[in-house]
Image (cartoon, rainbow, N blue to C red):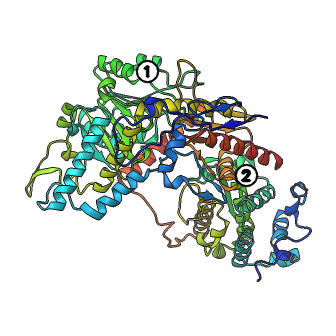
Amino acid sequence: MNTKNPQIFMPLNCAFLSPAKSRSRNTNPRNRAAFCLTISEPPLLQTLSVFQKVQALDLEFKSLSEPIDRVKRLLHYANLLPQFDESAKILENRVMGCTAQVWLEVKMDNNGVMKFRVDSDSEITKGFCSCLIWVLDGAKFEEILTVQTDDLIEMNVGLPSRGHSRVNTWHNVLISMQKRTKDLVEERNGQTIPSLIHDITVNGSYKETQNHNAVM
Amino acid sequence: MNTMEGVVLKLPYSFRIIKPNPNRTFRTVSLASASVTVASPDPILGPGSLGHLTRPDFPILHQEVNGKRLVYLDNAATSQKPTAVIRALQKYYEAWNSNVHRGIHFLSAKATDEYELARHKVANFINASDSREIVFTRNATEAINLVAYSWGLSNLKAGDEVILSIAEHHSAIVPWQFVAQKTGAILKFVSLTDNEVPDIGKLREMLSKKTKLLVVHHVSNVLASVLPINQIVSWAHDVGAKVLVDACQSVPHMVVDVKNLDADFLVASSHKMCGPTGIGFLYGKSELLSAMPPFLGGGEMIADVFLDHSTFAEPPSRFEAGTPAIGEAIGLGAAIDYLSGIGMQNIHDYEVELANYLYDSLQSVPKIRVYGPAPSQTVDRAALCSFNVEDVHPTDLATFLDQQHSIAIRSGHHCAQPLHRYLGINASARASLHFYNTKEDVDDFIRGLKDTVSFFASYK
């Protein structure tokens, strides 16, 4: 794919060109976000794998050479994020380790398809989350666990490092999505999936302190 | 039409070097002829200010980010380093690098001399009685932990009270939570006045015979408030309590005299005072340090080691286990030389003016809320402002300022979550200055901030 082909990344009818249009009542926000990524027909987009969507996002943001254009693109995608139920803004849904507040709701249907909803008090963070939702919402859990944080490095706005700092919100959100996906799968199947993320436990006086604090 | 001819400034005598520093010379210019028909430039913040004079010494400031001049306003997080400090580190590793205190060869002796000279410089800088009252640590956080684990665990028992303010940095709170859990001591927190400064009136009321320790910042990294430490220490001592002063935001910006303050413990970090990261210090009164058990165990801090027990060195070695950050300590010494060459009072006077200019300029930004007290005849603010703009998340502000305007500020809770919770906010943005910032930096920041606010308003 020619990453410099403007026809792919800036189609004439792309909603991104007109922020006002992005606030339309289109009820399929994924298709609108996807329309910015490619001029393909929506039904074709529905068949893209998680891997292909990650690649498409990677190429899209790589094509935006000016950092401010990446910011603007994220703000556009923030506008496309589906509404998040206020009642779901509870402590259990908080994604920790972010300088902005982020809430993540994770559900799995009977077919093992994952459903994600996310919200944040920061518009740029919402933009990151909107991209993650587009990639992962509706995917099977096996695909979700294959995404690496480095795969989305080009989405970094002003953060050239791969460091796991507190401001790498999308990194924290992605990890949360994957961890909670694993938890749901295990709960359903009654088995443990070995992983470094899942197997981190603490014991001893630190754990006692945390339990004490949780009770408090 | 206004014209300017030959406008140059002669620096007041106080801006000249008090102690000649071979690594630094000021360029002083004399007023020749001046036909100034424009308004007179600000005598402190105008051309030839301390900021303009010192900027050339900081190579990192002379770069572009995203095609624009870098404007670094995150000094409360870490300061930039002058060439003198960078060269000191390089010279150490090129000429003297060797382990200290034990070797008998030339390099070791030289490294030891330079390391201990740095300790003397720190002691002189804060007017400690003896260099043995200075313990080198990794940073102020480690220094506070040293006091918590060494002094705290030995001196606190169930029912004893430790008083802190809700505006303390996490590093000044969390170690005492650990100690309180282990000893049964009780932590009490002083809230803020309506002017958003720690309520020292309430603090005085909270002091009692149960109070064993007061942990308090000198300058707040969020509120920019300055506390009357010598008064607070006097009240604490009246009830027999010790005082630990977090001087991270004061030592780099003003004269700090531990004798005048009479603090029992005082901590600071090198990286906030133009020195390298990886080194900080604890000041402790001799009699207190002498009575404290070791913190970390290992080489250097021992006298004799047997299989079943060991005996320990006198302070400060008792608290400096292992090979220290030798180069970094020497770098800190070079930073102190540099700052002393300018004069801490000069730095403070300049930064007060710049702080007022920053605060006043921010008031012109629509829907802004700046935290902490307003500056006045009786209230000096530190040269930092934490703020929020209605309807725009501070993270978004900081990101846009960085990406579009190359302006570096901080967003988040600034390691002060209890304070943010008290103020009813999740996060704030913070611009923090140092003596190498200029009025133009502030002007660029305000312009960029207004543009940022407009940008996000257009997306609503």
**Residue type marked 1:** Leu
Q: Position of residue A12 (x, y in %)?
A: 91, 69
Circle number at residue B203: 1
Q: Position of residue A101 (x, y in %)?
A: 64, 49
Q: Nearer the viewer, residue B393 or A205?
A: B393
Residue A127 in the figure: left or right of residue B299: right
Q: Quadrant of residue B272?
A: top left
Disc 1/disc 2 C-alpha distance (Å): 40 Å
Vertical placement of A152 versus B276: above or below? below
Circle number at residue A123: 2
Parent chain of label 2: A
Residue at 59 percent of width and 38 percent of height = B47
Q: Secondary structure at mark 2?
A: helix
Q: How many marks?
A: 2
Q: Nearer the viewer, residue B294 or B124?
A: B124
Neighbours of disc 2 within 10 Å: few (<14), some (14-19), many (20+): many
Residue at 73 percent of width and 67 percent of height = A137
**Residue type marked 2:** Glu
Q: Position of residue A61 (x, y in %)?
A: 72, 69
Circle number at residue B440: none
Q: Position of residue B201 (x, y in %)?
A: 46, 16
Vertical placement of B23 versus B17: above or below? below
Q: Nearer the viewer, residue B251 or B51?
A: B51
Residue A148 in the figure: left or right of residue A25: left
Vertical placement of B398 versus B368: above or below? below
Which image quarter is the N terminus of chain A in? bottom right
Residue at 28 percent of width and 36 percent of height = B124
- Please indicate, yes or no, whether residue B77 appears anywhere in the rendered image: yes
Parent chain of label 1: B
Residue at 62 percent of width and 38 percent of height = B6
Q: Secondary structure at mark 1?
A: helix
- Please indicate, yes or no, whether residue B211 appears anywhere in the rendered image: no
